[in-house]
Amino acid sequence: MLQNSNFKTSRYRQGYKVMLPQERYQYLRAYERHALRLGRWILPDKMNPFHAMTEDEFVARFRLSKESTNVLIQKILHMLPVSLDGRGCSVPPHLQVLITLSYVATGSHQLSIADCCEVSQAFVSICVSRVARVIAHLSSEYIHFPPYMRRIYVMQEFMHIAGIPGVLGCIDCTHIAIQRPSSPRAEVFCCREGYFSINVQAVCGPQLKFFNIVARWPGSVHGSRIFDKSHICQELEDGKLDGHLLGDNGYPCRKYLLTPIIDPNNIHEQSYNVAHIKTHKTIERAFSVLKRRFSCLGKKLRTSLETTKVIIVACAILHNLAIQYRVAEPEIYVDDSNENPVDLMIHHPDPPNTQRNIEGNVRRQEIINQYF
């Protein structure tokens, strides 16, 4: 604590409150040097979490390490000009990033974050939208399938889980709750559980890193339709990506997308189903860690529809960045998987006699015969 200090006396009341953030920082640094020369304890500068917090405290509040946060700030610094809040005070880019990270990490009300950061609630709203949009521009850098040699290593890691060869990734959908959109067709966002949502499709690797994400479809749209209309489906169809994905029975069985067998007839097919379920759990764990790491996704997002879509993509990028820098997962593991047992009994959307479905069944049977 401060002892025998005039920091909170008339000088503080008269001058410190009207200083700009940069002036406050310089003043506090000068005061710290003076206090240290006198051998006094000093209070940390709460406006600068990089100095005021330990590494664990920083990760607990922002879900990224100091190193990874600095890397992120440097990448988007040129796209975030110094802004003014509602009171005319300048807010530097690094503080805009920390405000956004605090929002997505905690899912707190924007007013609470505004009070902690000494800005207005309106500025927090603008800041979250702006920074999330800038982070989303990094999607091509952080969310993509690995190059060829790395994909071989990914397939080996997946095979070590339960013995299924050639797995490029696991695919599934999860619902992100949102407020009722201000749109004439708002009802299409109502999912079968009865709340408004965005149905987010993602593909992940064995280390829970996202290789692909689609976050623009209403909650009422089925996952198989999202996949059919996605860019990743076209790439697999054209043979641009080798290997195959693993999906549940809500998806069609194709040569590049393997699903479980609905009615296994022998022990080999049963073994395949067990291995498929065990491997496919990877995407469920990825969704669970994502929602736990960024709690705003586990709650109802109350931002505008376009901003909500951008926030979802930005959180996936931050999740991959956290994995890249080996940031520890949240301590409490909560299974937020949206998998419904009914999905396991849904037959593939393609008619049984289509060419793509026949090729998928043949490919699946070849793997069963050879490996199970």
Image (cartoon, grey):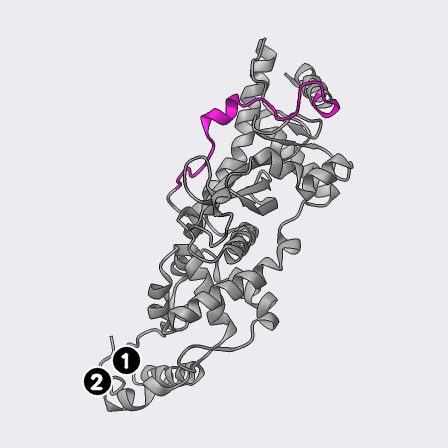
Closer to the chain start, of discs 2 and 1, is 2
Closer to the camera in the image, 155 or 358: 358
Q: How far apart are marks 2 and 1 (CA)?
A: 9 Å
Q: Position of residue 359 (x, y in %)?
A: 73, 22
Query: Which image quarter: residue 209?
Result: top right
- Which residue in the rendered view is the most extreme toward the left? 4
What residue do we see at 50% from left, 54% from top?
305
Closer to the camera in the image, 169 or 357: 357
Q: Where is residue 316 in the image (x, y as percent from the top left)?
A: 54, 50
Residue hosting label 2: 4
Residue hosting label 1: 40
Q: Where is residue 145 in the image (x, y as percent from the top left)?
A: 67, 44
Circle 1 SS class: loop
Q: What residue type is labelled 2?
A: Asn
Q: Give the range drawn in magenta.
A: 333-357
Q: In which quarter of the image is the N terminus?
A: bottom left
Is residue 351 shown in magenta? yes
Circle 2 SS class: loop
Query: Which image quarter: residue 49?
Result: bottom left
Residue 164 visible? The answer is yes
Q: Quadrant of the C terminus?
A: top right
